[in-house]
Amino acid sequence: MLVAALLVLVAAAAGAATIWELQAAEVEFRRDALVVRSRVFRAEVPVLTIREVVLLDTLPGPVRALRAIHLGTVFHGRFETGTRPDTAELFLDAARPPFAAVRTAGGLVIFNEDEPERTRARYATLAALVAARVPAPTREPATASRRTRNRRVPGR
């Protein structure tokens, strides 16, 4: 009897955790970075590292969960894709296109929100930020080494 009650309790907790995770991902901007997160997984993408932002009507090829939750049409976490790069962070419900795809040097993040209009608005905001961004500052070449700067010059 105790074992059956414990199994029911564990099953209820697992079901509640799954329902909790299957809520739509939250998308926001924080300090020059795009943050996409579900209840368990999170991706933070600095705006200066973004190479491309596109709006997709379909997902790029078949996906396979690597470190993720995939239940029905909901994908949260890291997935292997059939495209380059080989893996992507997905935060989406495949039944609710469009999807915003953010490509960086380090990978790919694809997300959507609970309403298509919100996804399109977030995409437009992100595309405008990326188009208007200032290039990352380049490091100035050193004119003199520390040893040279600290050397005493005769006559001074």
Image: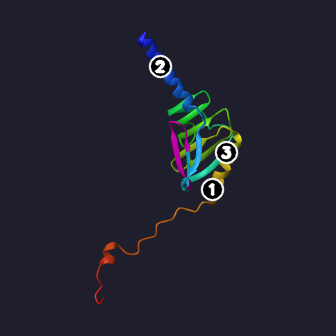
Tell me what residue is drawn at x 58 percent, y 41 percent. Answer: 26
User: Where residue 39 sits in the image (x, y, percent)?
Assistant: 53, 36
Q: Position of residue 151 (x, y in %)?
A: 29, 79
Q: Residue at x 30, y 85 (%)?
A: 153
Query: In the rendered image of this protein, does residue 21 appear above or below residue 56?
Result: above
Query: Contact, CB < 8 Å: mark 2 with mark 3?
Result: no
Residue 6 appears left or right of 27: left
Please give the label number shown on residue 146.
none
Q: Secondary structure at mark 1?
A: helix
Amino acid on which the number 3 mark rests in the picture: Leu
Please provide the residue range marked out in magenta: 36-47
In-front residue for pair 132/19: 19
Judge the density around disc 2: few (<14), some (14-19), many (≥20) Cα neighbours within 10 Å. Answer: few
Q: Is residue 43 left or right of residue 142?
A: right
> As shown in the figure, which amino acid type bears the numbered disc 1?
Leu
| Residue on which disc 3 sits | 55
